[in-house]
Amino acid sequence: MNEKHKKHSNVRKPKPLTHKYLEKIALVHIDRYATSIENLRNVLMRRVEKSVRTHKIDKREAEKWVKIIITKLVNLRLLDDQAYAESRVRSLHRLGASEKKIMSILSNKGISKVDSASAVSLLENEYCNRELMAANIYARKRRLGPYRLDEKRKERRNRDLASLARAGFRYDDAKNVIDAVSVVALEAEILSTTKYN
């Protein structure tokens, strides 16, 4: 037996899908990961596709199972796109993501524009200029602008602005961060525009 055949002989076949087993997969997934309805549907459908190829199960029947499982989880409030969007928006903002990037990520996870916009608007209640704060976080992580060594700062200015633009930040916010006199001055500007409830 050559090497190529050995690799394939050690691969274990997945268990045949049943409604109960597919529901167990869904519960394990939502227990382990925060997920949207559409993302869970994609995860379950990948399992269905795999089982259709290996065990020749009826695809239409399995698609019905996925629908039933997702409806059940939504009714039990174990799946909630709005709560997922709010959680994801806060997390991405803390990581320095721009509003454009946040909206794109949520869209890729199957969150509606209405739910995404509603979740993003919650940040407006906490910060007057959330984009400037996120741009500052992004610049700190990438060592751009005031976080860069002084001798290289001037020659790298345009590259730093371009980096913030590619990350989805407006020119005004990028310019405020990159052209800040110092880190202390930039953070003081951000704190002066922060709302405290």
Image (tube, rainbow, N blue to C red):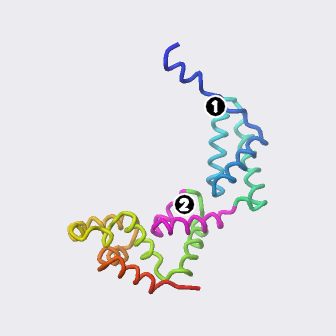
**Callout 2: SS:** helix
Quarter where residue 11 is shown = top right
Q: Residue at x 59, y 71 (%)?
A: 119
Q: Is residue 101 magenta?
A: yes
**Mark 1 surroundings: few (<14), some (14-19) or many (≥20) residues within 10 A:** few
Q: Is residue 28 above or below residue 197?
A: above
Q: Which residue is mark 1?
A: 53
Residue stretch in magenta: 80-108
Amino acid type assigned to the residue bearing label 2 in the image = Ser
Q: Which residue is mark 2?
A: 107
Amino acid type assigned to the residue bearing label 1 in the image = Arg
Quarter where residue 64 is shown = top right
Q: Residue at x 36, y 63 (%)?
A: 142
Marks 2/1 in contact by CB < 8 Å: the verdict is no
Task: Please state the horizontal and vertical placement of residue 125, each as a whole percent of the image.
Answer: 56, 81
Q: Residue at x 38, y 73 (%)?
A: 170
**Callout 1: SS:** helix
Q: Residue furthest top?
A: 1
Q: Is residue 10 above or below residue 37?
A: above
Quarter where residue 111 is shown = bottom right
Task: Please state the horizontal and vertical placement of residue 175, each as a whole percent of the image.
Answer: 32, 76
**Among numbered discs 2 and 1, the one appearing first in the sequence:** 1
